[in-house]
Amino acid sequence: MTLQGKVVAVTGGFGQLGLAVVRAALDAGAQVAALDRARSPADATALAGALALGELDLADADAALRAVNQVAGRFGGLDGLVNVAGTFRWETLEQGSLDTWDLLYRVNLRSAVSASRAALPHLLKRGGGRIVNIGAGAASKAGAGMGAYAASKAGVAKLTEALAEELKDRGVTVNAILPSIIDTPANRADMPKADFSRWVTPQAIADVIVFLLSDQASAVTGASIPVPGRV
């Protein structure tokens, strides 16, 4: 699968999944920008070859616009946007806070809306643009303590469907990936007794995303694609 000649921006690009997407896109031949709220990735060498833009609040429309325009200006355009930026909280409604709902809405959904809106003029200008969102398998059936997270990720699914319909005759595809539990150090620490071999790896998710960014996926839009591993 090749992304040769493509320019791809990855939000949440300093996290475990974001870094895997950045590396996979670079390996496929793309020019890649990693955008993140953090100042820099924990591993300074992890983004070698990519443009790294940190300290960004992508839920802020103006900040997202400036960042996306900077990427397009640096590389001469934009062909793909991958909305990885997100966070998780387990919290029951009874014992939790409404602030958690606001946080997960802002990070998981509003950032994707804001970044997508900023990217649209560039994607439409280039033709054959791609947007890939990170949803969640848990959004289809929320368990106890998962209300805020599942609601925000259900919003990502509906954003994906609506924007795909909006753009389907204009050459831009919009799809979502629905991971199960991702095999990251943080998740291993939170669930030390789990069978990690059943979880989906960031690299496996990144491979599917690279396909969706490629020319070979031009007929796929409005899809929410489960990538569960063996969970």
Image (cartoon, helix red, strand yellow):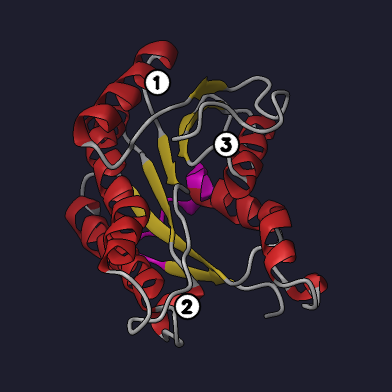
Task: Give the structural element (helix, strand or loop) at label 3.
Answer: loop
Which one is earlier in the sequence, the residue at label 3 or at label 1?
Answer: 3
* Sequence order check, earlier mark of 1 and 2: 1
Q: Is residue 70 above or below residue 83?
A: above
Tell which tag, 1 or 2, sits nearer the viewer. Answer: 2
x and y, in percent, of residue 17 in the image = 61, 49
Structural crowding at the residue carrying mark 3, measured as other residues with C-alpha within 10 Å and reported as few (<14), some (14–19) or many (≥20): many
| Viewer-closest of 97 and 67 | 97
Find residue 217 and report its horizontal and vertical position in percent: 48, 52
The kind of residue tagged 2 is: Ala
- Which structural element holds mark 1? helix
Residue 221 falls inside the magenta stretch: yes
Q: Residue furthest front?
A: 95
Question: Which residue does the image show at 30% across and 66% down from the upper left?
Answer: 101
Q: Position of residue 6 (x, y in %)?
A: 49, 28
Q: Amino acid at mark 1?
A: Val
Task: Name the residue carrying label 2.
Answer: 138
Report the residue marked by disc 1. Answer: 71
Mark 3 in CB contact with mark 2 (< 8 angstroms): no
Q: Secondary structure at mark 2?
A: helix
Q: Write the start and end of the magenta stretch as one range.
A: 213-223
Q: Residue at x 67, y 63 (%)?
A: 187
Residue 108 spot, x, y in % from top left: 37, 56
Q: Earlier in the sequence, mark 3 or mark 2?
A: 3
- To which residue does mark 3 refer? 14
Residue shown at 62% from the left, 70% from the top: 181
